[in-house]
Image (cartoon, grey):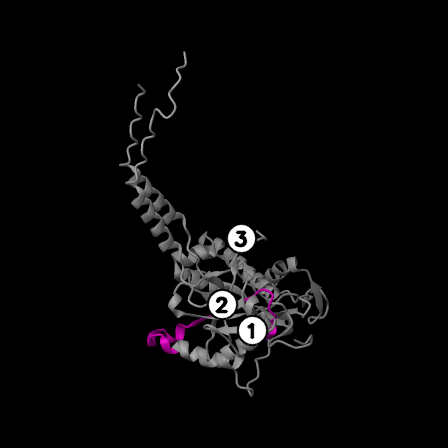
């Protein structure tokens, strides 16, 4: 036969909090490990195209980035909606690329100067005209190793 | 009187936490930058002319400002004939073109016997893929074509690597660099980019 308990007769046992630090540390480690620092603030919108034949950029210190895309929304009113180039933190013109390349190359140690890689982070909607201009400038400044940044997808024709 | 619930042991909580931590450590993949690697040709002085290449050795790929693709028609009588191509067929056609054909077939590029370490005498194709785009071509299509050309070469390398060494090319690249070099020599990444034209305007 069921017995009736008096309401509020029994206290809930307290939950042990001694493992909370462990959980917090776990979260801390997780975020520490999986966070990648963003070096620059993007002022152009870049969605890289998809590709399957990609190679990883192993040594980050050798890589300099050039961004090409349309200005982000908050700057669209001022900068227009044409494709623009971004170097470091600001908009740039094609003729500034040579200076950018030599400046970034200057920062590399001597034995690595010839291994410099320029990563082109170009929006999939951009036109080739501006990309070609950038490539011609890179050729002239002798930065010949380039990488078209893409999103990795599985090969669709396998 | 009701019996009190025994307290849950918290001693093993730390172990559980570490287990989770290690699980996430192992399974999380970091955002690695990746992309298609290319080498630009060095700047050429204006007075130097490009070496002549026979038309039968060149497979042309043109992309216009409307992102339509046109390629060399190797089935036609004239070696310089062009036809419009479907995006899906591009890889197959390029692969077919770059495959060495022995005995000599005028519809395909010439071959040359080269001596390569680990492989020996090999009939290497002299074929070159030449790619040209318009200034109005979208970057998406450009990368698509670059990717298909790279995929065609990679598939040829895979086939050769499987034939001689019994493994895929990228596996070989990690295990035996000298043999991978031999494959690269037999199937070079023969892609040339012409300076873009400007028909469609910016």
Q: Which residue is mark 1?
A: A84
Q: Is residue B82 visible?
A: yes
Seen from the viewer's position, the closer of residues A10 and B148 is A10
**B140 with respect to B173 (left or right):** right
3 or 1: tag closer to the N-terminus: 1
Check the image and report above or below for A3 versus B135: above
Dots 3, 1 in contact, CB < 8 A: no
**B96 with respect to B158 (left or right):** right
Give the residues drawn in magenta, as a range: A106-132
Instruction: Evaluate whether label 3 is on the same chain as label 1.
Output: yes
Q: Nearer the viewer, mark 3 or mark 1?
A: 1
Q: Chain of mark 2?
A: A
Seen from the viewer's position, the closer of residues A2 and B28 is A2
Coordinates of residue A99 in the picture (x, y in percent): 45, 81
Check residue A9 for magenta coloring.
no
Q: Is residue B42 visible?
A: no
Q: Nearer the viewer, mark 3 or mark 2?
A: 2
Of the numbered discs in the image, which one, if any, rests on residue A154?
A: 3
Secondary structure at numbered mark 3:
loop
């Amino acid at each position: 036969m069921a017995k009736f308990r008096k309401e509020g007769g029994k206290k809930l046992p307290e939950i042990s909090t001694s493992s909370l630090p462990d959980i917090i540390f776990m979260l801390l480690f997780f975020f520490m490990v999986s966070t990648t620092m963003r070096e620059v603030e993007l002022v152009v919108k870049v969605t890289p195209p998809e590709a399957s034949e990609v190679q990883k950029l192993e040594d980050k210190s050798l890589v300099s980035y050039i961004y090409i895309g349309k200005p982000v929304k908050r700057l669209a009113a001022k900068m227009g909606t044409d494709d623009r180039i971004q170097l470091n933190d600001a908009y740039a013109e094609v003729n500034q690329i040579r200076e950018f390349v030599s400046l970034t190359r200057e920062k590399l140690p001597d034995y690595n100067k010839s291994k410099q890689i320029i990563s082109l982070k170009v929006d999939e909607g951009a036109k080739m005209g501006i990309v070609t201009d950038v490539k011609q400038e890179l050729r002239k400044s002798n930065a010949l190793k380039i990488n078209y940044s893409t999103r990795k997808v599985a090969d669709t024709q396998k | 009187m009701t019996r009190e619930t025994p307290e849950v042991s918290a001693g093993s909580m730390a172990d559980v936490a570490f287990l989770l931590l290690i699980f996430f450590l192992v399974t999380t993949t970091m955002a690695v930058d990746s992309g298609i690697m290319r080498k630009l040709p060095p700047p050429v002085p204006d007075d130097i002319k490009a070496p002549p290449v026979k038309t039968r050795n060149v497979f042309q790929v043109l992309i216009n400002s409307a992102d339509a693709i046109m390629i060399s028609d190797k089935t036609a009588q004239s070696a310089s004939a062009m036809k419009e191509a479907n995006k899906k067929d591009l890889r197959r056609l390029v692969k077919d073109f770059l495959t060495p054909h022995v005995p000599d077939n005028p519809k395909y590029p010439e071959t040359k016997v080269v001596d390569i370490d680990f492989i020996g005498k090999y009939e290497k194709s002299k074929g070159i893929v030449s790619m040209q785009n318009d200034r109005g071509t979208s970057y998406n299509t450009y990368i698509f074509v670059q990717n298909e050309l790279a995929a065609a070469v990679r598939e040829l390398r895979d086939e050769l690597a499987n034939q001689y060494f019994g493994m895929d090319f990228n596996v070989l690249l990690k295990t035996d660099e000298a043999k991978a070099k031999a494959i690269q020599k037999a199937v070079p990444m023969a892609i040339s980019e012409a300076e873009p034209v400007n028909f469609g305007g910016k």
